[in-house]
């Protein structure tokens, strides 16, 4: 796919405190979005899920905490869980956030693009022909 980065704004649900993260690596292979713990703590994000075990791509299992944030990329936004990254951890925008933002990876152009209509079960009562 090739690597590319996007900017992101991370916001606290409770009081609107936010931080701009100029460079998050887009990683559709990561379930979670990862942000430096110091940034999350500075805007008051709580560690809601502590000692969560996460398996890395190399098979190693590590333990991190997770909190809830609002993520904004360009003109899109979503609510998601974000990992409190330790020193040395990459800052990543993961696939769950991409789905919530309704964005897809355009690998050739190395950018994010609108994913199109959101797929859902029908809310319209179907009329069956007799």
Image (cartoon, helix red, strand yellow):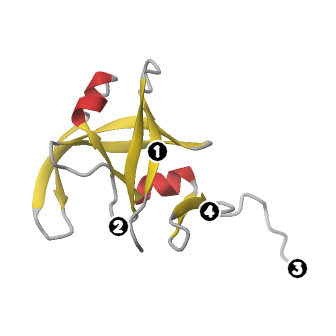
Question: What's the residue at 26%, 34% (across, down)?
Answer: 48
Q: Are marks 3 and 4 in contact (CB under 8 Å)?
A: no
Question: What's the residue at 38%, 65% (across, down)?
Answer: 3
Residue receiving disc 1: 7
Instruction: Using a 10 Å C-alpha cutoff, classify the residue at mark 3 as few (fewer than 14 neighbours), some (14 to 19) or many (20 or more).
Output: few
Residue receiving disc 2: 29
How far apart marks 4 and 2 lie (CA) works out to 17 Å
How far apart marks 4 and 1 lie (CA) works out to 18 Å
Circle 2 — which element?
A: loop
Residue 83 - label: none
Image quadrant of residue 43?
A: top left
Sequence-wise first label, 4 or 1: 1
Q: Are marks 2 and 1 in contact (CB under 8 Å)?
A: no
Circle 3 — which element?
A: loop
Most foreground residue, 13 or 93: 93
Residue receiving disc 3: 129
Give the label, 3 or 1, closer to the camera: 1
């Amino acid at each position: 796919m090739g690597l590319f980065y996007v900017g992101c704004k991370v916001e606290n649900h409770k009081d609107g405190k936010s931080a701009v993260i100029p460079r998050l690596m887009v990683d559709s292979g990561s379930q979670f979005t990862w942000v430096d713990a110091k940034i999350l703590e500075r805007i008051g994000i709580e560690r809601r899920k502590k000692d969560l075990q996460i398996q890395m791509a190399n098979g190693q299992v590590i333990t991190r905490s997770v909190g809830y944030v609002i993520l904004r990329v360009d003109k899109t936004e979503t609510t998601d869980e974000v990992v409190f990254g330790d020193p040395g951890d990459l800052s990543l925008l993961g696939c769950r956030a991409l789905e919530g933002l309704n964005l897809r990876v355009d690998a050739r152009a190395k950018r994010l693009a609108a994913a199109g209509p959101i797929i859902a079960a029908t809310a319209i009562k179907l009329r069956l022909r007799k």
